[in-house]
Image: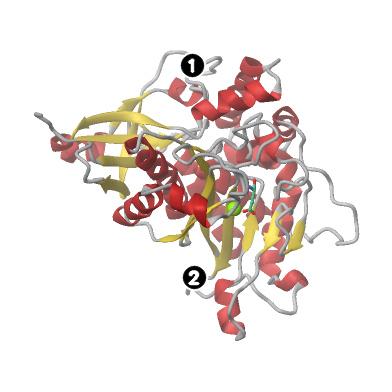
Amino acid sequence: MLREELIFVGTCDIAGHVRGKGFPASELPSRRKKGIGWTHSNLMQTAFGPIYDTPFGTGGDLMIVPDPSAELRVDFADGSAPEHFFLGNIENTDGSPWECCPREFLRRAVHALKEASGLELIASFEHEFVYTGNEERPGDAYSLGAFRRQGVFGESLVAALRAGGIEPDSFLPEYGPRQFEVTVKPEPALKAADQAVITREMARAAAFRLGHRAIFSPMPVADGVGNGVHIHFSLRDASGAPQTYDPAGPLGLSQAATQFAAGVLAHLPAIAAITAPSPVSYLRLTPNRWAPTAIDIVKQDRGAALRVCPVFAASKKKDIAKAFNLEFRVCDASASPYLALGALIFAGADGIARKLVLPEPEGAAQPLPRSLSQALDGMAKSEAVASWFGPTFLEAYLRHKRSELAHVAGLEPPELCARYAEIY
Ligand code: GLU
Ligand code: MG
């Protein structure tokens, strides 16, 4: 068949979807600068597609400009069109960053952390999802049988990640029926978020080519097992030396890491609306699912909002410090990785700037927001979040999410989960 290669340039938006436009690959040289045309109200496209509400109207022009460091070209070698896309920055027509660009939000957060502490953060997103190509069998949690019966999907996903310049770390059958998990090596914040977007897309791309789907919805089935996105992170200084570990500190955390974690906990009532941004996110954040329900930090506990992770097979302080990391578990794949990681970093940077301390371990931890609506109220009244977003982006975010909530108001959990399983 006659074919000409196409390239797509996109952003991962408020809904956590990658949206943009395509062009012939031969046009890339000119598209590197002018990108593709976009408009302000594109930001208001909800998870379901339609724009239910927008402060921007129909006017205005923007561009999504491809970032050369976020190019992916993977040929699955099955005759299908190669996956060739760039993640990009949303810019005004004069080339300045648009204030509501998700990647720019993360860049601002990285800058805030540097200003507050001189430190940078490295992160890795751990993704859980349901692969529909595996049948559901009782007893299959973590089983070799489930691992085998997914066929070549896992190998195809891992190969696609590697071909895309991402270093895979693990691929495993998870606890839930047909549920799998993929993890990759840590990278500096912006790259880690790009890789999170790409990881989701490669799982979808591999599944698509096998006639199936990878479903990342936080709760594909009501009362089922949740799909979490766990953000592992650690701090390092300008020389690259790890700065998260101090055996004498609380929970083994350095002073900077303690303050960072305290900032995250302090802002969780507001940032949950960004990291767990769909109504079904709050069906996942319920007891006995290895998902968090409270605003807490605990050593090696999978039910905590912040888990202090174990270090395996290391006894020297230097080796422990290198591997030591925290895991933020109040996140799922309905969130844009740029916004989720940006919010986490802004919150942590504020903790360092204000020298916050961790809550008393004996005290009862505050509950996490119980619904998206409660989380959005927390976000709306946070002065800190307002300063990170700026007035335009904040209003857009709140209107976007509230219009999504209004759209699904009245749906009972089974139907709600079914709707979100269709789109994530
Ligand atoms: N599925 C759990 C979640 O929703 C996490 C399970 C695990 O710790 O691997 O976060
Ligand atoms: Mg897991």
Residue drawn at 64 percent across, 21 percent down: 415
Q: Mark 2 points at which residue?
A: 238
Where residue 78 appears, x then y in whole percent?
22, 42
**Which is more foreground, mark 2 or mark 1?**
1
* Three-letter code for the amino acid on which mark 1 is drawn: Pro
Q: What element carries label 1?
A: loop
Per the rendering, the mark at residue 141 is: none
Residue 1 at x, y percent in the picture = 10, 29
With 413 as the anchor, is 313 left or right in this view? left
Residue appearing at x 54%, y 69% in the figure? 236
In this view, the residue in front, 38 or 98, is 38
From the viewer's perspective, tell me whether residue 236 is left or right of residue 286.
left
Q: Where is residue 115 in the image (x, y as percent from the top left)?
A: 57, 59
**Mark with earlier residue (2, 1):** 1
The tag on residue 50 is: 1
Q: In this view, does 112 lie above or below 63?
A: below
